[in-house]
Amino acid sequence: MNQAVEAFLNKVWKEITTIYAQESKRINEFKDRSTLQAGVHNYLRVTWRKGKFTWAKGKLHIDFSKLSYSGSYKLEVDTYIMELTDELLTEEFFPALCGLVDDLFRSEELGSRFFDYKFEVAFEFEWERSKLTLNKQLLNEPKLSQLQKTLDHFIQTRILPDSPVLPEEKDVFFFAYHLVNPDLMKQDVEVIDPLVRRLSDKLTTKQELKNGLISRYTLALKKWVNNYFLPQHFTRSDDYGMIWTLKEDHPSVDAREMDFFLYAALQIGFTETDIPQEYMELAVQLGSKKAADYLKNGSGKFARTYRGELIEGRNNDITQTIEIRILSEEELAYKEALDYIINLLKQEFPKSYQLKLESSQKNFLPLKELAKSELHQFFANALSYPTLFPKLAEYVDTAMEEFAWYEDVEPSEESVMPGTYAAMGLGLYSEDYFPLVCRYMELVDTEHQLAQDGYAEAFIEAHGVKKELMPVIVSILQGGIDEGTLVKNLTIDSPELAEALFEALKGKEIYECEMVLCRIFESIENLVEETQKAQPPLKEALEQLLALQIEMT
């Protein structure tokens, strides 16, 4: 072996074995592990990153995970690095490194739980104007065979038997990923779906564990789609890998894999409602008639059409669309429409839907920040009937979901959380729904939604500024954007209002108090000036607000 190669290999291997010895000690101390985990480590990457000014003044990086946030071990090397060539690295260094790794991988020197059943060795070397990339996959077949037997035993003893037999949480984690591992399970809907349904049904009374299963299973499916299925037929066309472009020479599509891809799209859609349409459109490009039917008619989970006495309804959960045709402009028609939508949402229709409306009424809420969409129009129309307020409140309670947005507009500053139009309208038109408005403001995403920022001004225009309303006003102010926009029609000009504001702010965090006060007085400095100019007893009441701020700092 070339001396430079030998020196380089010794440097790399010494670092790897030192770190592996420390890691082995940590892993062997694990007391509670799942039998479905064959081992912990399955990846090693050795990389020479060239220097900023010359390639030879770089650093050696060693990574034990593909995860970018896991961090690299960085090493300096000697001048022998300049003697290396692509030929030496390809024909001598990399085969020797793989041989050392393979011997250790197949032994139990580091403990039986250290290595997974498969292992990837990657090597990169950056020259001045080029890069060498090498890769090798290792497989421990006896370990894989044992894992297959363990998984089968787990299914027979923990999944298929009737309750109260349940798997442990640590096993659910690995089971979810094994289901989408072609080394362990046939990627066939008829094989996978019955197991998913069976375990989901068994976990009905263990909602947290069920949510964990769905979350991990969804991530596993997305990994299969994005790392295996789609790259066969498409190329990622932007930096974030979100846009897929069909390859001109893509291979023919395996029918079984296409069925599994469509199945994955529907399953992922339970937690990421925009995914089914995106994946179905890609499947149509590959010639899938089934995907085209999904896009036209929905998944089949919901009755496609509804014909009532006063409305007609249609829905498609794949495109996340609800269509309402008002046959007679009257209160009962909107009640019927609300019942139809609420029933869909309770059956898990995507809350981030868009609405297509046929109606001769065209009302909108007095809020300029809200998009004048057909969805907005529908709820504004319904709000014109006070007897429907309880039904609208029921809708809001059903529809509100943090970090979700209606699809009635393109993603923009006008995007709003499900329930927004009805909640804001109820708050403007009836004092009975102030608690609902407060719940909405506590839930809304103030970092990514802007439309609620102008609600305080509209609310005050409708109800005025009264001491008994101060807790609601404070809640609305807190629901605004983080920058804290000044509310021009909100004036604290009496000791009663200042006292009510003080009481509403007591117990809140300093940043919450500061935001509220800045939205009222524009800044703390302005509050100080107004306090200095005020006459008793308003002066003392404003001083309480300043004292509260000072006390909290």
Image (cartoon, grey):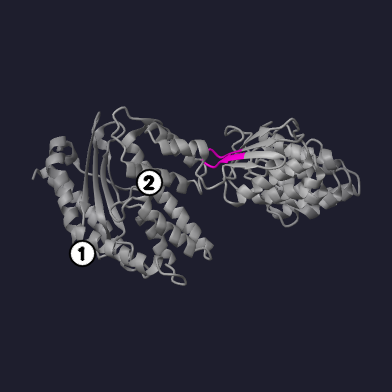
Question: What residue is rendered at 24% in x and 59% in y?
Answer: 144
Q: Quadrant of the N terminus?
A: top left
Residue flagged by tag 2: what amino acid is it?
A: Phe
Label 2's element? helix
Is residue 434 found left or right of 67 in the rendered image? right
Point out the stretch of residues depicted in magenta. Answer: 314-322
Q: Residues within 10 Å of mark 2 (few under 14, many from 20)?
A: many
Question: What residue is rendered at 64% in x and 39% in y?
Answer: 313
Q: Is residue 424 visible?
A: no
- Residue 248 % position (x, y): 31, 27
Sequence-wise, the earlier of marks 1 and 2 is 1
Q: Which of 355 and 365 is in front in this view?
A: 355
Label 1's element? loop
Question: What residue is rendered at 38% in x and 44% in y?
Answer: 259
- Does 345 appear above or below 449? below
Q: Name the residue under label 1.
A: 109
From this viewpoint, which residue is outermost toward the right?
536
